[in-house]
Amino acid sequence: MVRFLWGLLVAILAWGGLLHPTVSHAVEAAPRISDREIIESLAELKTGQQALQQQINDLKQSTQQQINDLKQSTQQQIDDLRREMNQRFDDMNRRFDDLMRLLQILTGALVLVLGGMLAWLVAIWRRLVRVEERQRAFETQDDEIKFLKENYSRLHEMLTRLVVDRSR
């Protein structure tokens, strides 16, 4: 850092000499600088260097603090986002569970309705079978009744003939 400051000082003096050629090319001899003045100038430069170093350190510390604050803020935002996402996933799972319960209820209701319809159809079919059996029984009885009527008519005719024939 000291080299940099010395280089900067030399560059400033060199540029100063180029801009003011009359000063740098003066014939007059420069007044002699005492050791004390050199030591005081070096002390001032050292103090300035320490002040610059302190400013750099302060800037580093401030920058590091800002970076740490930014990291903390970013981590907090990430944590908040994770919590929000977990909450949304929990809500979605609850909704999915509710939907599954609803589907189970609807499936149960459908099974119940279809079972009831099937039971009703079985009952109707049994009644229809009974009605057909009765109808067959009635048809059989009807045939028997016809048979009996015919035989009764024949017997009646025979008897009538017998009675008529005997009375003659």
Image (spheres, grey):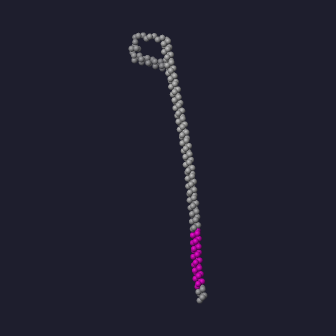
Asked which quadrant contains residue 17, the reply is top left
Q: Position of residue 120 (x, y in %)?
A: 57, 61
Q: Position of residue 150 (x, y in %)?
A: 57, 78
Left or right: residue 167 versus residue 5 is right
**Which residue is painted at 56% across and 55% down in the image?**
110
Q: Main secondary structure of the magenta part?
A: helix
Q: Position of residue 88 (x, y in %)?
A: 54, 42
Q: Is residue 144 above or below residue 17?
A: below
Front position in the image: 132 or 92: 92
**Which residue is painted at 53% across and 36% down in the image?**
77
**Which residue is painted at 48% across and 15% down in the image?**
41
- Which region of the structure is painted magenta? 133-161
Q: Is residue 4 above or below residue 133?
A: above
> Is residue 73 on the magenta stretch?
no
> Is residue 149 on the magenta stretch?
yes
**Which residue is painted at 49% across and 17% down in the image?**
45
Q: Quadrant of the C terminus?
A: bottom right
Q: Is residue 81 above or below residue 130?
A: above
